[in-house]
Structures are given as structure tokens and as C-alpha cells.
Image (cartoon, grey):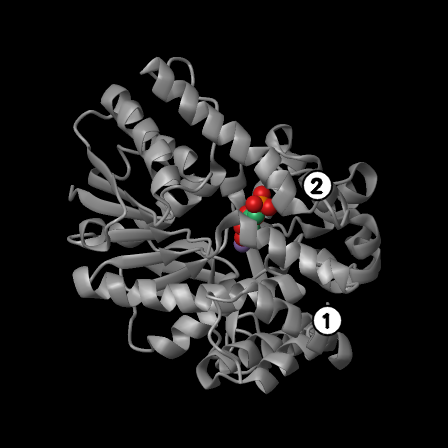
Amino acid sequence: MKEYSVCIVGGGSTFTPGFLKSFVRLREKFPIKKLVLFDIDKERQELVGKFGEILYKEHFPELDFSYTTDIKEAYSGMDFIFMQMRSGGLPMRQVDEHIPFAHGKIGQETCGAGGLSYGLRSVVDMIKAIYDIRTYAKDAWILNYSNPAAIVAEALRREFPDDKKILNICDQPENVIRSVSRLLNVDWEDLDPIYFGLNHFGWFKHIYDVNTGEDLLPKVKQIVKEKGFLPQDAEQRDASWLDTYGFVEKMLEDFPDYLPNTYNQYYLYPEYKFSKLDPNYTRADEVMASREKRVFSECEEVIKAGTLGDKFETISDAHAEMMIEVAISIAYNKNNRYILIVENNGAINNLQDDAMVEVVCELGINGPRPMRVGNIPQLYYGLLANQVSSEKLLVDAYYENSYTKALHAFTINRLVNDVTVARELLDALIEANKGYWPELK
Ligand code: G6P
Ligand code: MN
């Protein structure tokens, strides 16, 4: 069995310790010989890096593990590069979420004005990072789940049209499927979904039982109506995530056709969500007060003790496991099914070919093979055509340094929807993103 070299970009992320543990758990299925963590933030990288050294000394001593802030060391000789970059870090996520609130709109890291703000930062940093990667690892698979994934995917499609080894992916559809499996009390791997949409704006059209072929969606709707909806890992989630999953029940009342991605709440209920969110304590604040503290204090404790002790099991990580399974499907040409972000080209028949859509794909050594969902009904077509236009206009703004295109992207976004507010927001975000955004003229 070939052994692989792997790099994680964003090695100082709160998600990295869970990832590191998952490489131990999955080592039989995905044997790696070398793992390098890379981050531009030296301090965070060192903390997670030192934690990793102790973890692997105890649980995977033959692994060649290191961490660095140097791109050449990070990328040279890599087979797989997991990208979880957060451009501007959590402090800029806070900005993306707070500024829109001050203008009466929802700030969210991937939806609405917050997502557009983060989008322009990520496009700049991701394009640069991929050129760097290709300088040192021209054949590496790049598994990208940096947000906002829809906008990043659109920019990478344009910048690297011939690069067939960039894969854009999000874990939320699979999180929903795992949550459905909890609801039905079945193994999530026995669920075979049909899904369509854009990243963070999609729907499950069917959820088949792989063994019987039965479409379980009607049953799922019924149980959600009776019992509500919880994330699979509800016990480890912050309150805001429990609200988010719980809101699926309301979305199914108003839009009974399909099971929605949880993120649809922002696009379909912006005023309600706005009224419920605390402008001074958004998700960024919650993450810094909870996950960041929890994960980093675990790293500190392990470093202080010099041993993992009983902390191997404390972080379970569906997200990391999914990303590693994705790499396995490519590495061993398994053609397993994943919900991935790919160029449409007819997968959603009545949506433009060059939209980056999220659909079920078979995934093997030559990349994703999307499955077609046919024509989607008018309602969904209308929502998606609008959102894809907003995302494309933002990427146009990046390429053309165009203030007007950015203004139009904000204006037609469902979470802004007014040119006067869009202009105020854009001006405030230009100011806040100095040094991150390209100049818009
Ligand atoms: C889900 C989404 C990711 C997003 C994450 C945010 O997993 O698919 O795109 O980054 O949630 O989670 P957080 O806990 O940081 O709000
Ligand atoms: Mn996502």
C-alpha cells in the first residue's frame, strides 16, 4: 500500500487537533508517512504543533511529523494538501459578522454581506496559496474546504481552469445526513442522498435506504415534525448550532418539498434570524469563547503534562474523518459518493453550465463525476440563479477591481437586497478589509 505525504494548511486552526487524532484512527485505511502542518500564525501553529508531537510520539511514532511557517517546507513532495485557511482569522470573522448588523443586516461568515466580505479576502489568499503549492507540489491533490467555499470555488475555477486536482468540498451536507441517521436510528453509511444546490444553499431531494431502495425522505419529514431535529453530535455543540438544526422543522413547514441544508435559514428567514441574533455576540464571539478556548486549553494541558493521558478520545471529529475518507476515495480510486462543489455542466439541467454547484459525485483517482438531478422547480431555480449571480459578480469585482460589480453583488444578495444599504455596507467593509481586499475602483 502506498504511503502518502500530507500537509494541512491552517495547521493552527481549532479543527486541527481533531484532524490529527483522526489520522491516528484511520491509519490502517490511509497510511501516511509524512505530515506537515502549515500556518502563517507562528504562535497558533506552535501550540497545535507541539500538541501533535506528543500525540504522535505516543500513538503513531513512525510518522514523520513536523510543523512550519515556511511554504517550501510545507508543500514540497506532498501528495495531499488539506486547505482550511481562514483569511484574517477569527478577529476578521467577527468584523464580517458585526458590521452588517450595524447596518440592519445579518452578518454571517458565508451568507450575505459577511460572506461576501470574507469571500474577497479568501479569493486573494487562496489564489496565492495555490500558486505557491503548484511551485513546490505540482501534482498534489488540493482538498479545499476554506470558506466561503462557493465563492472560493468560483474564483479557483476561473484562475486554474486546467488544474484537475483541486477539489472543493463542504462538510455540512454530510453533517445533515449523519443527523438524519441519528433521527432514524440507522447507520449513516446506509443513507444514499440525492442533493442539489450551491454551497450552503441546497436541498436533499431524496434520501434512499441503500439496502431497500426506499426513499426515506417522507419518514424523515414526519419525524422532524413530531420530534424536531438535532445534530448528530448534539452533545458537543454550542447552543447556536442546536437552534440552527432545530430550525429545520420550521423550514420544512414552509418549504415541504425537500430537506434543507441548515444554512438556508439565513436566505429564507433573514428578518426573523436578524431579530434573534445578538449583534454584540455573534458566532465568532461564541467560537472564541467556546471552541477556541476548549481546544487550545486542551493543547496547553497536554504540552504541560508532556503526555496525552486520557485525552485521545475527547475530540471526536466527523468533519476530519470525512475529509480523510475523501482523500482515501481518491488515493485508492474507490469512487465513493460525496456531495461536492463542481462546475455544473448540466448536473442541474436548468441552471447555467458555469455555476459551481453542490451535488452528489462519485469520487476517484481522476476526480469527481457529478450525478445529474435534472431540472429543478421554479422556486429553487429562482433562489439559486439569484445567489449564483451575487457570487459571480463578487468574483468579477476581484478580477476587474470593480467597485460597481462588488456593489451589484451586495445589492442582489438576498440578505442585503437594497442598493443604498449595499453601498453603506460595502464602504464600511472596504475600510475594515484594508490590507486584505484588492483595491476596488
Ligand atoms: C459547518 C460548515 C463550515 C463552517 C462551519 C462553521 O461545518 O460547513 O463551512 O466553517 O460549520 O462552524 P463554526 O462552528 O465555526 O461556526
Ligand atoms: Mn461549509
Three-letter amino acid code at disc 1?
Arg
Image coordinates of residue 281 in percent, x first then y, are 71, 44
Q: Which mark is residue 114?
A: none
Residue drawn at the location 46% of the way across and 66% of the way down: 435
Residue 30, quarter of the rendered image: top left
Report how far apart the C-alphas of labels 2 and 1 lie in the structure.
22 Å
The residue lying at 75 percent from left, 50 percent from top is 279
Vertical placement of residue 47 versus 97, above or below:
above
Q: Nearer the viewer, residue 52 or 25?
A: 52
- Could you tell me if residue 410 is visible in this image? yes
Q: Position of residue 243 (x, y in %)?
A: 74, 42
Mark 1 closeness class: few <14, some 14–19, many ≥20 residues within 10 Å: many
Write the residue at 30% across / 69% down: 164
Horizontal side, residue 76 vs residue 280: left or right: left
Give the SS element for disc 2: helix
Amino acid type at circle 2 is: Ser
Q: Which residue is mark 2?
A: 240
Q: Nearer the viewer, residue 197 or 8?
A: 8
| Count of labels in the image | 2
Do labels 2 and 1 touch, CB within 8 Å? no
Residue 294 drawn at (x, y percent): 53, 28
Q: Relative to residue 332, is residue 341 depicted above or below? A: below
Query: Looking at the image, which is closer to me, 414 or 366?
Result: 414
Residue 131 versus residue 245 in the image, above or below: below
- Residue 414 image label: 1
Q: Going from the N terminus, do you reach mark 2 or mark 1 first?
A: 2
The image quadrant in which ligand 2 is located: bottom right
Q: Secondary structure at mark 1?
A: loop
Q: Residue placed at 59% from the left, 68% from the top?
A: 431
Q: Measured from the top left, where is residue 382 in percent x and y?
A: 70, 78
Q: Is mark 2 within 8 Å of ligand 1?
A: yes
